Image (cartoon, grey):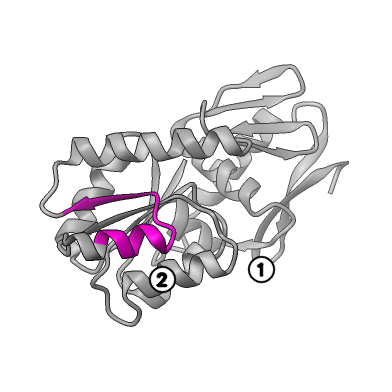
Amino acid sequence: MRILVIEDEEKVANFIQRGLEEEQYVVDVASDGKTGLEMALSGMYDAIVLDLMLPGKDGFEVLQELRAADNETPVIILTARGSTKDRVRGLDLGADDYLPKPFHFDELAARLRSVLRRSSAQKSTKIVVGDLVLDTAAHLVWRGDKEIELTAKEYALLEYLMRNKHRIVSRTMIMEHVWKDPLAPMSNIIEVYIKRLRSKIEFDGKRFIHNVRGIGYRIKEPSNGE
């Protein structure tokens, strides 16, 4: 599952990111409210951890605009502003939970699992492209009745492509979201992993992953050949 952390304190953001990645989540970080809102509105995230005191837009504004756009991604507010008034306002604006700073990571992880369970009960955890199915809750992939075994990085790359099905994603976008390194677009690591994915999911000659020359990749319903 993919989690967005909107937190301007670098040490806190890095602490949360490392912890969640050890829990097998894919984690993106935004350090200001404006960027965080733009990322949240993409619909790519299963949950959001949101600080209130942010530059650009504060957490209340981010939450209000997110809900006004009919985005129901679960939100956990994580902030030093722990007054009853602030908690009530955050919950009234549509937050799913509220955890004051300082906090224990184990409690944050437990609260995150709780909101994800509630959210999963309301929506499907499966992403489907043709007969290729990826289950974000179980971390499993199938083609028809055949389960596809993937490494953690292969799974992360396929999930990113499938969440953006029919859209072209650039090499830079892939490096940033899957390898967390937007400054290394000249590496051939993407091609290596795309080749591995193709060998595993395109075993019957049907093409899912398409190379868009000079730009990046796109995944769509299968066809025979390019």
Asked if the stretch drawn in magenta spans residue 119, the answer is no
In this rendering, is residue 14 above or below 138?
below
Q: Which residue is drawn at 64% across and 19% down?
A: 147
The picture quadrant where one finds residue 31 is: bottom left
In this rendering, is residue 113 above or below 98?
above
Amino acid type, residue under disc 1 in the picture: Gly
Viewer-proximal residue among 44 and 48: 48
**Horizontal placement of 189 versus 180: left or right?**
right
Tell me where the magenta segment starts and ends, as one range. 87-100
Of discs 1 and 2, which sits in the foreground? Answer: 2
**Horizontal placement of 161 versus 190: left or right?**
right
Viewer-proximal residue among 178 and 126: 126
Counting from the top left corner in percent of width and height, residue 129 is at 75, 40
Counting from the top left corner in percent of width and height, residue 62 is at 41, 71
Mark 2 lies on a secondary structure that is helix
Q: Which mark is residue 62?
A: 2
Amino acid type, residue under disc 2 in the picture: Val
Q: Which residue in the rendered view is the most extreme toward the right?
A: 224
Mark 1 lies on a secondary structure that is loop
Task: Answer with mark 1 or mark 2, whichever residue precedes in sequence.
Answer: 2
Q: Which residue is drawn at 60% across and 62% down?
A: 70
Counting from the top left corner in percent of width and height, residue 128 is at 72, 38
Asked if the stretch drawn in magenta spans residue 89, the answer is yes
Residue that mark 1 sits on: 214
